[in-house]
Structure formats: C-alpha cells, structure tokens
Image: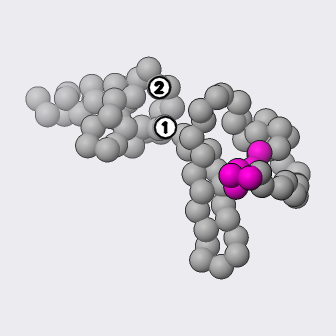
Amino acid sequence: MKVTSVARPTDKLGRIVIPKELRDAYNIIEHKTKIEFSCDGRDTIFIRPVRDICLFCGEEKDSLLVHYKNQLICKNCIKELQEKMK
C-alpha cells in the first residue's frame, strides 16, 4: 500500500474523520467498527481497526466466536479442546 499523509481538522468536540481512502484500504467499512488508539509515548498516535479473532487460530467470523473470560474463542477450537479433555 502507498504511504499516505492526510491532515484533517478536529471539530468542536475534538473528533476527526478518517479519510475514505484509509477506511477503504483498512476495510473500515461498517458502522460502529471498533478503532484502537495508542501512542509511542512521544508524539505519534497509532490508529488501527480492532478485529475480533479467536485467541488460538485467528478465526474472524463473528458467528463462530464465543466470549470466555474476556477472550474470544471460536467454536471449532472449543470443539477441539473438548475432544482433548476426553
């Protein structure tokens, strides 16, 4: 992907709009997509989409994910764990 730099002003509430080109490039297309903000302790702010994935295999399908103790585990991995416990 081509490195892009875009400046956007904040509104009265301090909000910014992520440019459409970046939303498209990072597949941020759904309303209510979770975005993580972090910083390096200096003057850089990192923004990335949060993807709900299985702790073990990385599966992304929401319909297959189960929340367990603040972690996400897909139904396939749960089934494998159950088999190993027998």
Residue 82 at x, y = what percent?
19, 29
Quadrant for residue 84, please give it: top left
Q: Please say if 23 is above or below 65.
A: below
Report the predominant secondary structure element of the magenta stretch: loop
Q: Seen from this angle, which residue lies furthest bottom?
A: 42
Q: Residue at x 26, y 43 (%)?
A: 69
Q: Report, in whole angstroms, how far the alpha carbon at label 2 lies from the one at label 1.
A: 7 Å
Q: At which x and y percent is residue 12?
A: 74, 52
Q: Nearer the viewer, residue 64 or 35?
A: 35
* Rendering coords of residue 73 (x, y %): 35, 35
User: Sequence-wise, which precedes: disc 2 or disc 1?
Assistant: 1
Above or below, comparing residue 71 to residue 12 in the picture: above
Q: Is residue 3 above or below residue 65?
A: below
Residue that label 2 marks: 62
Q: Which residue is mark 1?
A: 52
Residue pictured at 72% horizontal, 41% vertical: 26
